[in-house]
Image (spheres, coloured by chain):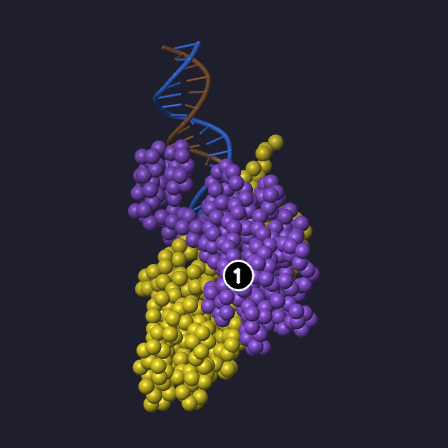
Chain colours: A yellow, B purple, C brown, D blue
Amino acid sequence: MRKEASRATGRPTLAEVARLAGVSQITASRALRDVPTVDPVLVSKVREASKALGYVPNPAARTLASARSQSVVVLVPALSNHLFIETLEAIHNVLRPRGYDVLIGNFHYSRKEEEELIRNYLAIQPCGILLTGFDRTEASRRLLEANKVPCVHMMELTKAEDIFSVGFSQEDAGAVIARHLLARGKRRLAYVAAQLDARVIRRGEGFKRALAEAGVDASLELVVPDPSSVGLGGELFDRLLRQHPEVDGIFFCNDDLAHGAIFEAQRQGISVPGRIAFVGFNDLPMSAHIVPRLTSIRTPREDVGKHAAHLMLALLAGAEVRDRTIDLGFELVVRESS
Amino acid sequence: MRKEASRATGRPTLAEVARLAGVSQITASRALRDVPTVDPVLVSKVREASKALGYVPNPAARTLASARSQSVVVLVPALSNHLFIETLEAIHNVLRPRGYDVLIGNFHYSRKEEEELIRNYLAIQPCGILLTGFDRTEASRRLLEANKVPCVHMMELTKAEDIFSVGFSQEDAGAVIARHLLARGKRRLAYVAAQLDARVIRRGEGFKRALAEAGVDASLELVVPDPSSVGLGGELFDRLLRQHPEVDGIFFCNDDLAHGAIFEAQRQGISVPGRIAFVGFNDLPMSAHIVPRLTSIRTPREDVGKHAAHLMLALLAGAEVRDRTIDLGFELVVRESS
DNA sequence: TCCTCGTAAGATAGCGCTGTCTTATCGAAG
DNA sequence: CTTCGATAAGACAGCGCTATCTTACGAGGA
């Protein structure tokens, strides 16, 4: 009498499934992985046996044997923010039902921290990585390259070959806002931004370029590196107004700042949009309810996640991907604040 | 000449570290895991060899061999919400530097979905699970029990033996709010809640109990199962006011609802707190800036994550844990809205 | 001096899968 | 009727680590 399986997990293994189905272990393995060279009759036998035993594959064994896990890593610059949450949710919803684990890495808008995360997460041999934007350290790029992990970039677009990206044009969005404020008759326009990352900068560039093209002064801006917050929005608005009392329209790089500014304006008795118009970015749920309701750019956050995840699935399946760039656009939602 | 290591990952392995350090593989393994029975001299030799080779342990192999992964699963009812984000961040900050992977499961306030997540995540043999609250299906409980995974429960407290919990008393918090509103001279008080979960219900119970104890009518409430949102807060406030125009104080089960109500009141020209006082729950960042600033309960979300993670570490280390219950308390932040 | 015992190091044997090579089977071509 | 190639199924080995058992060794007691 041997003390069988003392170290085992107690769960049914592939070998047991194979035995019950009357096939070899490797055939059972292939059947469950949809390898096409298996007789459909055997496949269904294996499927039944698997179900009968309540078999669940052991991901660790799978990873060890194939040198590639079933984990997809998603790196985002922040979590304290509806944007990425919705994107993450969408990614989860696509990938989890298909058996992938989703690992979230928050790099707090720090390229250095992102590099560290990449280094650490590569240890688990992820089968794919979803990244935010293109702005990262050279070392990060090299690590990804060297490990041959499929990557999909979210939130921005590029024309570069060999790069998969899902998002929209930050610059165009900024330009649309500029034209909207101009159409409202505003002429003394400013860009207010915090938490400078590549996307925020690009939005501002689009905004200022459109102003310049319209022959309007595009030099007014108040840009700080601090983390964005509602409180900061109020402060920045107050500061801008002291320095430039003539300002009659502001594009805030995100809704949080705009919300803070709305509260501050309310406290100071400044009429919005009468004296000054506000436009935000991202269209957070609150923006449709705040007084006055905030004009904003609705970004396709959820769709970015969904499409990025599907693109990753295609890459993992080894499919030929024609469109390496998926432009999901954006929408200007005009409300009371402008 | 053998085509050595064709399937290998190319990364250095424990065997190479052992060879370089001049010890057996198992000794190297023990040295790197801080098993105490290894000669300190050998430990440092192994450490050096490991560093020299840039060795990173393979988590899959480790999991397979030990039948336990380095992953900690965290199950939360929602992500669209600052609360859990901050808690998750804190958990990450504690566990990741110690080599654990943190897997997040969002069960969308659904016990059924939570059960499914538990079932699925057990496949990866997590070394621990962090749960939100105690309210789950019998099957979930059995699964956790049967798999002998250490569990820590967050956000609520219990006196039950053998259950580790980190949080605060939801009921007491509700009671504190009731007493605060009473102290403000309000007498027609209502509880407005959405997204009913165990904690929201408990808050309401504490609130109503405190009212009853003070001899005040505790029957006024508007409670709906829909997902909580800013918009819903406005609607519920409007509906309540039509049905009970005499209401002079409302406890909203969370800040989102309260924010929506503030906007709605503003639109209707209703004075807050003059005619009616508002109190929220959670103290989201926005609550300190909205007009009027919102009185709320500041919950120790970050600390809950931190303490829960440390408790988990203690359990994983096999330490003797004396206090199975960690009460982190809460704080009533009184502002303009009451 | 011999023997026991506690401790540290090593040898061994897997954990549960999948990559790769080999073998069986069958139909088509010569 | 034989040979060949394509295809499906299986045998085999091993991914990189750790649990477990075994051995070596020195200290302490009889």
Q: Residue at x 44, y 78 (%)?
A: A269
Q: Residue C1's quadrant in the figure?
A: top left
**Figure quadrant of the C terminus of chain B:** bottom right
Query: SS at mark 1?
Result: strand
Q: Residue at x 42, y 68 (%)?
A: A231
Q: Residue B228's quadrant in the figure?
A: bottom right
In the depicted view, which residue is nearer to us: A103 or B96? Answer: B96
Can the viewer see residue B305?
no
Where in the figure is residue A194, as x and y percent of width and height?
37, 70
Which residue in the protein does label 1 denote? B296
Chain of residue at mark 1? B
Relative to B119, residue A183 above or below? below
Give the residue type that dot 1 points to. Answer: Ser
Q: Residue at x 52, y 38 (%)?
A: B322
Where in the figure is residue D8, as x and y percent of width and height?
59, 59
Where in the figure is residue B222, as x and y percent of width and height?
66, 65
In the depicted view, which residue is nearer to us: A216 or A118? Answer: A216
Q: Is residue A186 left or right of residue A312?
A: left
Where in the figure is residue A216, as x and y percent of width and height?
34, 88
